[in-house]
Image: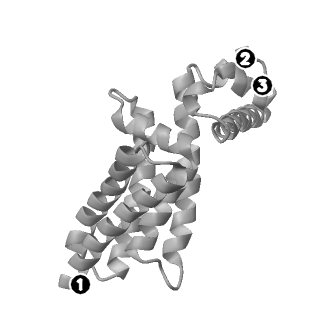
């Protein structure tokens, strides 16, 4: 019995240390692009030796995947609260907030596109990635339902809309305008046009 409790405690301690490493990586990603962050930097941020970090994450890619999952899961909770409000946002407001979050969290967006485009993701990573992206599809599907979309069409619209938003951002994030503010304004115009297409479709029924 005592051995079982000791083993359980050691496992909890290991998971807690692993979480500290992931949170340290996320903190670094907030300050610089994720592809410029090395394992040694993460170890320094977490207060452990570079050798120790590999006990928790055998590769840099595994650490980055876990960091992305943590980041996007945190964002999903924020959006979920938005949809649950007594007065939920419009389709346009949801779209703008979604894109603004990715603009303001550049590393999260870079990791998102990396995972979207990478071949041969490991099963555990793919499973977690599918789970967190499903959360956003579920939320937007729920929002569409609130705005009157029939159940049979809501999922298809949710897939199409979220894909449209990420596609617009991928296409125009480096658009050659004067500054980041003008680039963001151009992206928001496109989001508004896209949102209007879905809104008109809802009005048509």
Q: Where is residue 21 in the image (x, y as percent from the top left)?
A: 70, 33
- Under circle 3, the secondary element is helix
Q: Is residue 38 visible?
A: yes
In the rendering, which numbered label is found on residue 44?
3
The quadrant holding residue 158 is: bottom left
- Most extreme residue toward the left, as rendered? 204
Asked whether, in this view, residue 189 is left or right of residue 152, the answer is: right
Residue 205 visible (yes or no) = no
Judged by depth in the image, the label closer to the viewer, 1 or 2, is 1
In the image, residue 133 above or below residue 27: below
- When the figure is inspected, residue 103 is found, relative to residue 202, above or below; the finding is above
- Give the mark nearer the N terminus: 3 vs 2: 3
- Residue in the image at 37% along x and 81% along y: 146
Is residue 140 found left or right of 74 in the rendered image? Answer: left
Other-residue count near label 2 (Cα within 10 Å), few / some / many at <14 / 14–19 / ≥20 = some
Distance from Cα at disc 3 to Cα at disc 2: 8 Å
Query: Which quadrant holds residue 85?
Result: bottom right
Colouring style: one colour
Q: Can you identify the residue that label 1 sits on?
A: 203
Q: In this view, does 163 lie above or below 78?
A: above
In this view, the residue in front, 139 or 93, is 93
Calculate the distance from the C-alpha at mark 1 to the C-alpha at mark 3.
55 Å
Relative horizontal placement of residue 188, taking residue 157 as reference (left or right): right
Of 186 and 165, nearer the camera is: 186
């Amino acid at each position: 019995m005592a051995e079982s409790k000791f083993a359980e405690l050691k496992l909890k301690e290991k998971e807690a240390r692993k979480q500290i490493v992931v949170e340290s990586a996320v903190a670094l990603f907030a300050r610089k692009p994720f592809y410029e962050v090395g394992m040694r930097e993460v170890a320094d941020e977490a207060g452990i030796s570079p050798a120790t970090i590999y006990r928790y994450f055998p590769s840099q890619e595994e650490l980055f995947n876990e960091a992305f999952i943590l980041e996007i899961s945190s964002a999903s909770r924020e959006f979920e609260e938005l949809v649950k409000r007594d007065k939920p946002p419009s389709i346009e407001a949801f779209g703008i907030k979604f894109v603004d979050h990715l603009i303001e969290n550049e590393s999260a967006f870079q990791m998102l596109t990396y995972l979207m485009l990478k071949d041969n993701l490991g099963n555990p990573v793919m499973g977690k990635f599918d789970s967190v992206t499903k959360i956003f599809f579920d939320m937007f599907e729920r929002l569409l339902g609130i705005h009157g979309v029939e159940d049979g069409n809501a999922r298809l619209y949710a897939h199409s809309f979220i894909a449209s938003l990420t596609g617009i951002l991928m296409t125009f994030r480096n658009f050659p305008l004067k500054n980041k503010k003008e680039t963001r304004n151009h992206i928001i115009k496109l989001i508004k046009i896209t949102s209007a297409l879905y809104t008109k479709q809802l009005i048509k029924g």
